[in-house]
Image (spheres, helix red, strand yellow):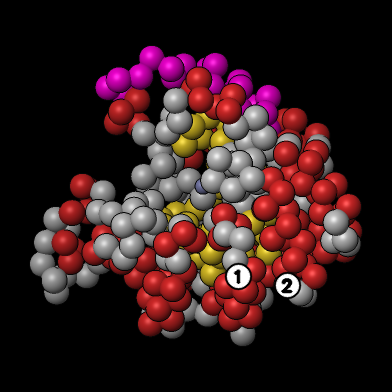
């Protein structure tokens, strides 16, 4: 049994004891590079980098020491760009990920490689994910610290399963933890439990992202009891679930004794090209400061203790990265 006491970040390894207040699911940029190159006149590199520096500096000034950024293939990951931003925000740790983000098919790049071409060929994603953890991302020395995959409204498609099993196998080789994007409305968590269980993954190493979109406290408590870490990670996306419902779910899970199985975040970005810009004003709380300004005060007001808040923002992120 081993315990890891350092976690890889964009600016190199950091002792897990120094992660401090951590938002467990935020993005610097979410981009569609192919579409950006073909259609967009929104992107100006220097403007966007300056804007990201400003937003992350404000986050750092609010006391957040670390953000965990699950931006991988499918979300426009460019680690050099993130490093440029991070260089100008020295008080903030950014923890990078490896993996593939898809709800349906594997990216075209993988379509006719490995088992996509012939069933008996090995899955190339496994070694690529391990390379990101061990050697670095995109030819840099910046190493990923965890894996990311997704399952959404299409359920367990062939492509989703390929990625999920590749992540599980790369996890078995490296020990780095796994974050899975879920769609609680479709109870995708049941498929995650089955596939990762089949691969021998310990639920305590798995973060179920976006389960905070659900108000089914019994379901969530059951997942916590199995050992999964619950991502209460979309505070501010009120169009999916409103503020009061999100808060009430965390309050009730704390009351039932599950503060040690929850993490908090916004799933926000400095810039995301997935959303029509003039619609963003309809999500005024979807920003990096909402938890500190609104959510934590509301939790404390409704009976959650400061100790439980610290558990969710400091203790649990640290535990998740300390492999045991
Ligand atoms: Zn996300």
Query: Which stretch did the figure color magenta?
Result: 37-56
> Where does residue 146 sit, x and y in percent of width and height?
52, 60
Badge 1: residue crowd in 10 Å (few <14, some 14–19, many ≥20): many
> Where does residue 147 sit, x and y in percent of width and height?
47, 60
Q: In this view, does 20 lie to the left or right of 280?
A: right
Query: Disc 1, ligand 1: is the CB inside 8 Å?
Result: no
Q: In this view, does 92 lie to the left or right of 85?
A: right
For the residue labelled by badge 2, is the local secondary structure a helix, a strand or a loop?
loop
Q: In this view, does 67 lie above or below 85?
A: below
Question: Does any portion of residue 79 appear in the rendered image?
Answer: yes
Question: Does any portion of residue 266 appear in the rendered image?
Answer: no
> Looking at the image, which residue is at 63% across and 36% down?
286
Which numbered mark, 1 or 2, is in the foreground of this view?
1
Q: In this view, does 241 lie above or below 315?
A: above
Is residue 7 found inside the magenta-colored segment of the image? no
> Looking at the image, which residue is at 67% across and 35% down?
285
Give the main secondary structure of the magenta stretch.
helix
> Where does residue 225 sit, x and y in percent of width and height?
63, 80
Badge 2: residue crowd in 10 Å (few <14, some 14–19, many ≥20): many
Is disc 1 in contact with disc 2, using a CB cutoff of under 8 Å? yes
| Image quarter in which the C terminus is found | bottom right
For disc 2, the marked residue is: 258
Query: Disc 2, ligand 1: is the CB inside 8 Å?
Result: no
For disc 1, the marked residue is: 220
Q: Nearer the viewer, residue 304 or 28?
A: 304
Q: Nearer the viewer, residue 128 or 119?
A: 119
> Where does residue 188 sit, x and y in percent of width and height?
42, 65
Is residue 49 found inside the magenta-colored segment of the image? yes
């Amino acid at each position: 049994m081993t315990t890891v006491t350092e976690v890889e970040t964009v600016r190199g390894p950091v002792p897990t004891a120094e992660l401090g207040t951590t938002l467990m699911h935020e993005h610097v940029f979410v981009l569609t590079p192919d579409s950006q190159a073909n259609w967009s006149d929104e992107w100006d590199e220097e403007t966007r980098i300056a804007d990201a520096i400003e937003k992350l500096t404000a986050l750092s000034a609010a006391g957040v020491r670390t953000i965990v950024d699950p931006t991988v293939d499918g979300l426009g990951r460019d680690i050099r760009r993130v490093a440029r931003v991070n260089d100008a925000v020295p008080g903030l740790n950014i923890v990078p990920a490896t993996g593939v983000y898809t709800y349906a098919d594997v990216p075209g790049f993988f379509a006719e490689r490995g088992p996509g071409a012939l069933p008996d060929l090995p899955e190339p994603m496994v070694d690529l994910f391990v390379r990101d953890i061990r050697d670095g991302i995109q030819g840099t020395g910046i190493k990923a610290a965890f894996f990311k995959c997704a399952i959404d409204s299409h359920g367990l498609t062939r492509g989703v399963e390929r990625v999920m099993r590749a992540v599980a196998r790369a996890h078995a080789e490296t020990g780095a933890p796994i974050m899975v994007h879920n769609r609680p409305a479709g109870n995708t968590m049941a498929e995650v439990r089955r596939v990762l269980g089949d691969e021998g993954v310990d639920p305590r190493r798995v973060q179920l992202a976006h389960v905070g979109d659900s108000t089914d406290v019994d379901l969530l408590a059951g997942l916590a009891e199995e050992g999964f870490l619950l991502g209460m990670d979309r505070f501010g996306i009120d169009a999916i679930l409103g503020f009061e419902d999100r808060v009430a779910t965390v309050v009730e899970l704390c009351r039932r004794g599950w503060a040690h199985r929850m993490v908090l975040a916004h799933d926000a970005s400095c810039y995301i090209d997935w959303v029509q810009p003039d619609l963003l004003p309809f999500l005024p709380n979807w920003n990096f400061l909402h938890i500190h300004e609104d959510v934590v005060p509301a939790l404390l007001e409704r009976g959650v203790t400061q100790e439980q808040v610290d558990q969710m923002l400091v203790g649990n992120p640290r535990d998740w990265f300390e492999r045991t």
